């Protein structure tokens, strides 16, 4: 379920019993929310986006990715395929995403078999910063657990018992790991019709 930045911060304050902001400043709540967003595992981001706009050119291994809207980092790219004469998606085993001047390029390890083949790119959306008016579609349970762990690392031992703080950090880490495992089971990409690309 999605939520706005304001909703996430409010939920964190509720879970910390800190509506008045005595344990952490409001800016810190917003900061840990953003940090949790940035650290949200790419493997959990979804739905995955499939792009088929790149066509091969005979003898060319390097392809400009600036036309793929939203793709801004090499770490977003998950897998690549190329179609064959029988309509199968053939996995591309060796490739690299390079960046030059902020422009991404796909570099194949070897020449494509011929021109006009479609290169299918599977990639994940990059997160946005959480603000008071921004909405995120990332899993709220994972975000809350991660953000709570970050907050508790800076808990004031003069307000809360150190043993309690330690136990709470362990609890929220366990909740995050359990939710992550659950999401991984739900987010497995469906199998594609593939065969090995003959070398």
Image (cartoon, helix red, strand yellow):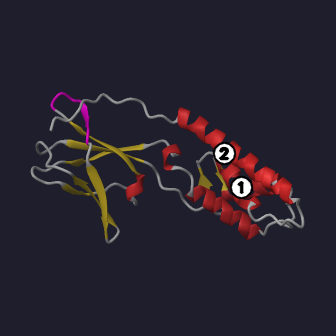
SS at mark 2? helix
What's the magenta region?
85-92
Instruction: Give the mark, 2 or 1, whose residue is nearer the N terminus.
Output: 1
Where's the N terminus, which quadrant? top right
Between 147 and 152, the one lying in front of the other is 152
The residue positioned 72% from the left and 70% from the top of the image is: 27
The residue positioned 25% from the left and 47% from the top of the image is: 94
Residue 144: percent from the left, percent from the top?
Answer: 70, 51
Marks 2,1: beta carbons within 8 A? yes
19 displayed left or right of 31:
right
Q: Which residue was labeled with disc 1?
A: 149
74 displayed left or right of 105:
right
The outermost residue toward the front is 163
Quarter of the rendering containing residue 119: top left
Q: From where the camera sits, is residue 132 visible?
A: no
Q: Which residue was labeled with disc 2?
A: 176
């Amino acid at each position: 379920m999605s939520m706005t930045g304001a909703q996430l911060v409010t939920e964190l304050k509720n879970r910390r019993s800190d509506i008045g902001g005595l344990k952490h400043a409001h800016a810190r709540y917003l900061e840990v929310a953003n940090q949790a967003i940035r650290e949200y595992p790419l493997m959990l981001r979804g739905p995955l986006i499939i792009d088929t706009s790149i066509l091969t050119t005979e003898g060319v291994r390097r392809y400009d990715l600036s036309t793929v809207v939203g793709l801004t980092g090499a770490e977003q790219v998950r897998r690549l395929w190329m179609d064959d004469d029988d309509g199968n998606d053939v996995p591309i085993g060796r490739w690299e995403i390079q960046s030059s001047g902020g422009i991404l390029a796909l570099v194949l390890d070897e020449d494509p078999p011929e021109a006009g083949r479609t290169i299918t790119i599977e990639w994940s959306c990059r997160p946005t910063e959480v603000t008071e008016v921004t909405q995120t579609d990332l899993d709220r349970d994972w975000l809350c657990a991660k953000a709570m762990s970050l907050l508790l690392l800076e808990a004031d031992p003069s307000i809360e018992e150190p043993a309690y703080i330690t136990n709470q950090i362990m609890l929220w880490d366990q909740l995050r790991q359990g939710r992550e495992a659950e999401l991984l089971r739900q987010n497995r990409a469906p199998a594609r019709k593939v065969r090995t690309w003959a070398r």
